[in-house]
Image: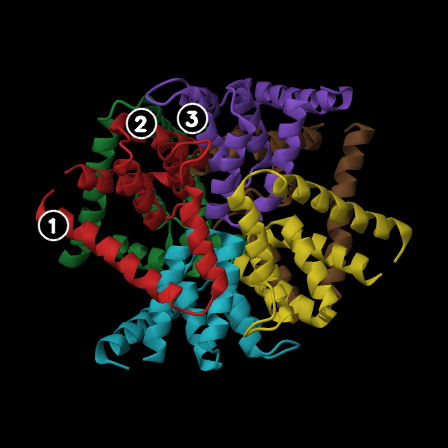
Chain colours: A yellow, B cyan, C green, D red, E purple, F brown
Amino acid sequence: MSNSNKNALTEFNSYRAKMNEKILSSDNLVLKRLFNLDAQTYAEGALNVKTKEMLGLVASLVLRCDDCVKYHLEKCFEQGTSTAELFEVLAVANIVGGTIVIPHTRRAVEFWEVLNS
Amino acid sequence: MSNSNKNALTEFNSYRAKMNEKILSSDNLVLKRLFNLDAQTYAEGALNVKTKEMLGLVASLVLRCDDCVKYHLEKCFEQGTSTAELFEVLAVANIVGGTIVIPHTRRAVEFWEVLNS
Amino acid sequence: MSNSNKNALTEFNSYRAKMNEKILSSDNLVLKRLFNLDAQTYAEGALNVKTKEMLGLVASLVLRCDDCVKYHLEKCFEQGTSTAELFEVLAVANIVGGTIVIPHTRRAVEFWEVLNS
Amino acid sequence: MSNSNKNALTEFNSYRAKMNEKILSSDNLVLKRLFNLDAQTYAEGALNVKTKEMLGLVASLVLRCDDCVKYHLEKCFEQGTSTAELFEVLAVANIVGGTIVIPHTRRAVEFWEVLNS
Amino acid sequence: MSNSNKNALTEFNSYRAKMNEKILSSDNLVLKRLFNLDAQTYAEGALNVKTKEMLGLVASLVLRCDDCVKYHLEKCFEQGTSTAELFEVLAVANIVGGTIVIPHTRRAVEFWEVLNS
Amino acid sequence: MSNSNKNALTEFNSYRAKMNEKILSSDNLVLKRLFNLDAQTYAEGALNVKTKEMLGLVASLVLRCDDCVKYHLEKCFEQGTSTAELFEVLAVANIVGGTIVIPHTRRAVEFWEVLNS
């Protein structure tokens, strides 16, 4: 991975970590539990982690949340998703969600290249 | 399957078929091609059909389209998705999309019972 | 128009009229003014009424509001929109908004037939 | 409350209760915990229950989830929300979310009348 | 407030003011009236301004409009909303709207710190 | 057009072109065909290109996709849409989609000035 790509990735992850810590250090139990629950959702179960992360990715794409897309792209990458598989997830998202998903698809492909660089 | 369940399922599918035919018999090429493309999206590829149908299902759930949910539930059922797997797809949808997905989850569970009856 | 179609149309319009009256008879000025503004939005201006009603229709379709779709279909029909033109509006909506717009497209085509019957 | 109104209300609540029970009797921990968390969210805290229910209502309105709207309308009613207050919540929802919220507003006003009958 | 925070806030507000002026100086009556109506919506009524601004905030959060969120955060801050109250609004938004609201919650918490600095 | 405006426009278009090429050079047929179909959607038909581009614009605005808005603004500009006509499209979008469309309207007006500069 090039230095500039490494930086972009580090910055994304450290901002998320920093803000999550602030949210979790508040006294709001509902938010704390939701964050916990979020982590449990993608744990191995009847479906494996890779499938669940692809589910999280396609849901994030059709809801057009770039940060959520990046998060699940990282997880999909860690789970060994191939580029051909990734593009099929992107295809489902664009067909179900329409061409308004295209700009998010562009940014997803760009981030996928960073992860693979 | 009970007669009333069979009827509900038949009615859903025949309305869809009847209206699709009207749309496809129009002279609009874009709609015809989109319908074609929709079918291709879920064909076996790098990902198998079952995984793709679960992707279509979770996307339909977070976008809260009951008819799309029903359609993909039927396909997931045909692909041998287990009830435990289905509930994990529902869980991802509800966590990503929030409690506004709950009413659609209720109707999805009801329709899943029809398919399994 | 057949009697059953006429009834469906009358019922849709009279429910809307009855509930609008209740909302407008409340003392809430913001809602009253928004309802007024809604009517002004589609008045002849730099764009003609027919174009504006097609704009309202495509917006309602991608936001997947069946009642709004029906309302603008009626207006498009009154403005002399042809069936070929209608299908091009439907095509834009389905391409921009994706296949989740299909169920709404089915119901739109069904209602368009009622209007033309 | 008239018998037909009472029936509509009872049917809505019993369907919800029946399906919730099915969902909660599944072995899916994520869904169970989310349902639990949902209940905690609206408990008395820094904000009182009435304010929180109005927050839940306006969120449900702009996301256009009729069942969620009904649920929070019942809770708002139990918390003594006045009709003038309700209409101000509806006004915020319609201004923020636009005229696509109007059909949901009509159904909300109709349900509010049932609750007050 | 630090100079860099003050600058971020000033820049956000001056861009909004500059563009609003351009929109309002156009000859489009509908947009002018909608902007006016927007201001009236949050005026003291049956509900107080603070409650209405929290309603505007939660609606903006679930619809995931960062600029709208910032706007209502400023207003909530001016109305004396406490941090505990703010987090309860955030909790409702995240439960109703799901984890796709989390990235917006992070940015909301960051902006809240700017306002409180 | 000033140099800085020209640069902003060039950068937007070249990023889109670069990423589209990457997506189209993948082996994913569904995405390729969808991109093709997208182009066909706005071709002259029963409706002229200008009307179709306005339809694409209003759909993009209510779905709040800034990149899609910019794309259709460029096309509307090329088709000779007047500023008065543009503002009527913006008005429909803001009335149907609500005040959450306002931040996108600000950016649309800013980009429209770039195109007209």
The image shows residue E53 at horizontal and vertical percentages of 47, 26
Above/below status of A67 relative to A50: above
Quarter location, residue C117: bottom left
Quarter location, residue C71: top left
Which residue type carries mark 3?
Lys
Quarter location, residue B11: bottom left
Element on which disc 1 rests: helix
Q: Label 1, on which residue?
A: D4
Q: Do labels 2 and 1 share a chain?
A: yes
Above/below status of C24 relative to B48: above
Image position of A27 (left or right of C15): right
Which residue type carries mark 1?
Ser
Residue at image position (40%, 61%) is: B105
Element on which disc 2 rests: helix
Image position of C9 (left or right of E109): left
The image shows residue C83 at horizontal and vertical percentages of 38, 55
Check the residue under mark 2 and report the chain it is in. D
Residue A100 visible within the image: yes
Mark 2–mark 3 distance (CA, rounded to whole Å): 10 Å
Numbered-mark total:
3
Residue at image position (66%, 65%) is: F32
Instruction: Give yes or no for contact between labels 2 and 1 (Cβ–Cβ under 8 Å).
Output: no
Q: Label 2, on which residue?
A: D85
Residue at image position (40%, 43%) is: D60
Mark 3–mark 1 distance (CA, rounded to whole Å): 34 Å
Q: Do labels 3 and 1 share a chain?
A: no
Element on which disc 3 rests: helix
Mark 2–mark 1 distance (CA, rounded to whole Å): 26 Å
Q: Label 3, on which residue?
A: E52
Above/below status of B49 relative to F88: below
Q: How many C-alpha atoms fall within 10 Å of the one at disc 1: few (<14), some, or many (≥20)?
A: few
The image shows residue B63 at horizontal and vertical percentages of 48, 55
